[in-house]
């Protein structure tokens, strides 16, 4: 403080020395006050840095990943909320040759005009926002462990809010993956992706075919974004000339005041972004191991005699099979929870026969009761087991059961116990997609016993449906293969099948002529299956199995069947059946199959079964790592900037490049980094990483490659089933795991593979190749290492010579070499040296 006696001389000094103020100003600019640190939140290696104007950037290791600018948060208002409208944002952007875009009356997006940023704590920042001109709201960003949580809550007292929008900016060239099941592409850049099944009048089915919707998208630079909502939503990714825009809109309507929750994830590798997503939405539950397959089914099983004949035939033909399901019709009606007595006089004995042959049994089912269900239908109607208000039914039988009604749910579960008592261990869960949005922004009005409507039950209904069947299995993991699913459904142990895709080699939206010569724009065949499996794997659904050969317009011709069999064998679930009810051994002029086709199926079905220890190891590890078994190429190798949809990795070690083009006998694909060799011949893969290479692909072959340093565990070559079996001659993994086989590709760098049961195998190539192993809980006997190599001069086990023999199955230790392939057998726990 300056007292008066000192102030007067100071004023005189300032007046008389006019240069002094200039000196003070100059000194100020020469030594400005320190710039305040920007407001920052941290979550592990990631951080969010805020500017004063309310914008912020997500980064990891100082690498910018997502930018939230002044238009990143928007509020969509209307004059008034109309109860007859769905406020489905898809209709703001729809692309359809017939259907038109529709905006609600008075609709307007309002962007941020004013923001006040406050750091509430080291873990939370609040942005008080005004949206043009007078809608207020708040965006809260919280660090939660390794992720960030955004809460976007508008005030609804000034203007009615119909929709909310979050639209960050990403890199303009990276790939976008996830978002559930899609048939056309795996990389969603340039795509419009609704988060619910929508009409698409450009294809035969009339729908977008996205039966599984997950509002989780990841970028290959290492970020993930999950919108935790059960409302109608849509993603628009790099469209309209804005290559960097990730635009997501949500029809929150009467729930707008509850806001929108968005989770942000980061990872050093994009493949690791599933781990935090699954930590938020629930860990993947595994099915029973026998769900790996192979599985067989007919679209219509004539009667018990035909089922029993199929069981006998597949074993007589030596077709590796772990399970089968019986599709509709088998019951008196849909759904009478029985077997029609004249066609299936002793269903229990039939199931026991299948089980003795090493086959688990599942049944087709739906949540409906047709009129012919008689007393069950009457009971449901009398007791109010159907929804109080029903919209458009997308099935021919009845309204879907109302699982929000506890009495209806208990009624359904009690009847399912009838099938469980007969030995049924799984269900094919079809349909249940009636609760869908209406056309052109209008409601398809449904109301359920708990008061919920179609605005949220479009997601929640399928989850309640599946949970009834999950509960019926009790402690058994069993087998639930479902057409539909939503985010969070991975906790129910689902296998997804893509519904009724074409029995062709055509792509989604590609015209072709059907068997009657009629021009058809299809939903896609094998190419659609390849893309759907990959998109699901990056959305938290690691188990996928398309109908091998397709369903619509079946049977497939011989080429389509053989190409599809090859690909299915290198997927997570191999299941074979089509609408023609012609299993692999049935030859007709339509399907063109012959002994070659059956031999091809036999070889690849057994390869799939033999790959079980490899695949199941990744499946069990996913609960800790989040990494799926089937992996899009562009996610595994983001540094290449290539996003092919027709090739993928199966685990770390296998590259799969299916042939999906009719008439093709060569295959061009993007070469991955590193050294690789052919699975079937050991030939080295030539070319440069990131460039196209071409290999021969005759009809009976699959371009399949294995990485240098790989150790791929396999079951024995004679294995028949994963399930228990009591019939003589049926080799069952459950009965006896047998010897562990391992495909090896030597490398100078030491590598190891630890199996799901704790068994471990290692390799290192030096002056000699050293192979070692330790037993696990299932594999306890011998190991057979197999590799392509010149005939060695010596093979040693723990220092002692290993003899070359004619038949490895007859000895406890030995080696064989033929046509460039070496096989060496020893007890698990031994160390082998190959010179």
Image: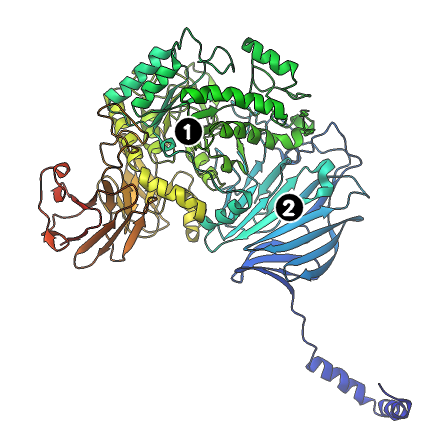
| Quarter of the figure with residue 749 | bottom left
Q: Mark 1 or mark 2, which is nearer to you?
A: 2
Q: Residue 28, image x and y in percent?
A: 73, 81
Determine which of the numbered discs, if any, sits on residue 708 in the image. Answer: none
Q: Position of residue 741 (x, y in %)?
A: 23, 41
Residue nearest the observer in this picture, 286 or 583: 286
Residue visible at 56% across and 31% down in the picture: 463
Residue extending furthest top? 342
Give SS at disc 2: strand
Q: Is residue 541 above or below residue 37?
A: above
- Tell me if I can see residue 402 in this picture: no
Residue identifier under label 1: 546
The image shows residue 778 at horizontal and vertical percentages of 29, 41
Apparent side of residue 570 relative to residue 3 in the rendered image (left or right): left
For label 1, count other residues whose C-alpha is less than 10 Å away and answer few (under 14), some (14-19) or many (20+).
many
Mark toward the start of the polypeptide (1 vs 2): 2
The residue identified by callout 2 is: 261
Question: How far apart in space, not on screen, are marks 1 and 2 (Cα)?
Answer: 33 Å
Secondary structure of the residue carrying tag 1 is loop
Q: Is residue 790 visible?
A: yes
Q: Quadrant of the N terminus?
A: bottom right
Residue 452, position as x, y percentages in the image: 68, 30
The quadrant the C terminus occupies is bottom left
Taking the image as shown, residue 345 lies to the left or right of residue 170, namely left
In the rendered structure, the answer to whether residue 617 lies left or right of residue 806 reads: right
Establish if 477 lies above or below 331: below
């Amino acid at each position: 403080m300056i007292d008066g006696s000192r102030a007067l001389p100071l004023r005189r000094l300032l007046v008389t020395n006019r240069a002094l103020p200039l000196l003070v100003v100059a000194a100020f600019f020469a030594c400005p006050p320190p710039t305040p640190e920007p407001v920052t939140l941290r979550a592990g290696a990631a951080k969010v840095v805020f500017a004063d104007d309310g914008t912020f950037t997500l980064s990891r290791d100082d690498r910018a990943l997502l930018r939230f600018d002044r238009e990143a948060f928007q509020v969509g208002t209307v004059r008034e909320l109309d109860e007859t409208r769905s406020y489905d944002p898809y209709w703001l952007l729809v692309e359809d040759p017939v259907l038109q875009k529709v905006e609600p009356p008075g609709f307007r997006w309002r962007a941020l005009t004013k923001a006040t940023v406050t750091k509430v704590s080291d873990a939370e920042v609040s942005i008080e926002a005004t949206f043009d001109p007078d809608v207020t709201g708040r965006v809260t960003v919280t660090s939660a462990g390794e992720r960030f949580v955004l809460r976007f809550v508008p005030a609804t007292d000034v203007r009615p809010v119909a929709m909310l929008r979050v639209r960050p900016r990403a890199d303009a060239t990276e790939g976008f993956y996830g978002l559930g099941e899609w048939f056309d592409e795996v990389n969603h850049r340039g795509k419009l992706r609704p988060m619910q099944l929508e009409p698409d009048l450009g294809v035969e089915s009339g729908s977008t075919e996205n039966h599984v919707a997950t509002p989780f998208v990841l970028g290959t630079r290492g970020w993930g974004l999950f919108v935790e909502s059960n409302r109608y939503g849509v993603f628009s990714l790099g469209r309209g000339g804005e290559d960097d825009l990730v635009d997501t809109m949500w029809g929150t309507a009467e729930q707008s005041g509850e806001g929108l929750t968005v989770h942000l994830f980061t990872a050093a590798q994009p493949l690791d972004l599933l781990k935090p997503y699954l930590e938020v939405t629930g860990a993947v539950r595994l099915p029973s191991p026998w769900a790996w397959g192979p599985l067989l089914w007919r679209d219509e099983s004539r009667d018990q005699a035909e089922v029993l004949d199929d069981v006998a035939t597949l074993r007589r033909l030596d077709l590796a099979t772990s399970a089968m399901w019986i599709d509709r019709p088998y019951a008196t009606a849909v759904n009478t929870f029985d077997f029609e007595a004249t066609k299936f006089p002793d269903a229990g004995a039939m199931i026991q026969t299948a089980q003795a042959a090493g086959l688990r049994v599942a049944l087709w089912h739906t949540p409906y009761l047709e009129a012919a269900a008689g007393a069950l239908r009457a009971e449901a109607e009398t007791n109010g087991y159907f929804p109080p208000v029903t919209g458009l039914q997308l099935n021919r039988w009845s309204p879907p059961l109302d699982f929000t009604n506890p009495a209806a749910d208990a009624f359904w579960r009690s009847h399912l116990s009838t099938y469980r008592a007969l030995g049924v261990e799984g269900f094919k869960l079809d349909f249940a997609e009636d609760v869908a949005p209406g056309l052109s922004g209008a409601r398809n009005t449904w109301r359920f016993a708990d008061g919920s409507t179609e605005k949220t039950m479009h997601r929640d209904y399928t989850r309640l449906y599946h949970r009834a069947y999950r509960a019926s299995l009790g402690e058994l993991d069993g087998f639930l293969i479902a057409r539909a699913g939503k985010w969070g459904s991975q906790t129910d142990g689902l296998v997804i099948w893509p519904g009724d895709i074409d029995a062709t080699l055509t792509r989604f939206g590609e015209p072709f002529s059907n068997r009657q010569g009629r021009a058809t724009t299809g939903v896609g065949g094998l190419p659609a299956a390849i893309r759907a499996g990959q998109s699901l794997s990056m959305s938290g659904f690691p188990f996928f199995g398309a109908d091998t050969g397709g369903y619509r317009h079946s049977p497939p011709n011989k080429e389509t069947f053989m190409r599809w069999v090859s690909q299915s064998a290198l997927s997570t679930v191999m299941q074979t059946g089509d609408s023609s009810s012609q299993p692999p051994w049935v030859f007709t002029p339509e399907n063109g199959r012959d002994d070659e086709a059956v031999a091809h199926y036999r070889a690849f079905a057994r390869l799939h079964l033999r790959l079980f220890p490899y695949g199941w190891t990744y499946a069990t590890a996913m609960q800790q790592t989040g990494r799926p078994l089937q992996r899009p190429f562009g996610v595994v190798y983001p540094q290449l900037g290539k996003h092919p949809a027709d090739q993928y990795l199966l685990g770390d070690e296998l590259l799969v490049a299916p042939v999906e083009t009719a008439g093709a006998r060569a295959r061009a694909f993007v070469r991955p980094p590193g050294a690789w060799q052919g699975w079937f011949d050991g030939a080295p893969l030539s070319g440069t990483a990131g460039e196209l290479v071409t290999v021969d692909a005759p009809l009976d072959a699959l371009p399949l490659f294995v990485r240098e340093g790989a150790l791929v565990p396999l079951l024995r070559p004679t294995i028949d089933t994963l399930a228990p079996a009591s019939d003589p001659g049926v080799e069952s993994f459950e009965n006896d795991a047998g010897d562990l086989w391992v495909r090896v590709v030597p490398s100078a760098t030491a590598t190891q593979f630890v199996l799901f049961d704790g068994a471990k195998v290692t390799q290192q190539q030096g002056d000699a190749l050293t192979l070692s192993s330790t037993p696990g809980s299932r594999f306890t006997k011998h190991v057979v290492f197999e590799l392509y190599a010149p005939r060695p001069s010596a093979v040693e086990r723990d220092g002692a010579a290993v003899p070359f023999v004619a038949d490895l199955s007859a000895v406890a230790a030995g080696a064989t070499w033929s046509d460039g392939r070496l096989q060496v057998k020893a007890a698990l726990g031994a160390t082998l040296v190959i010179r």
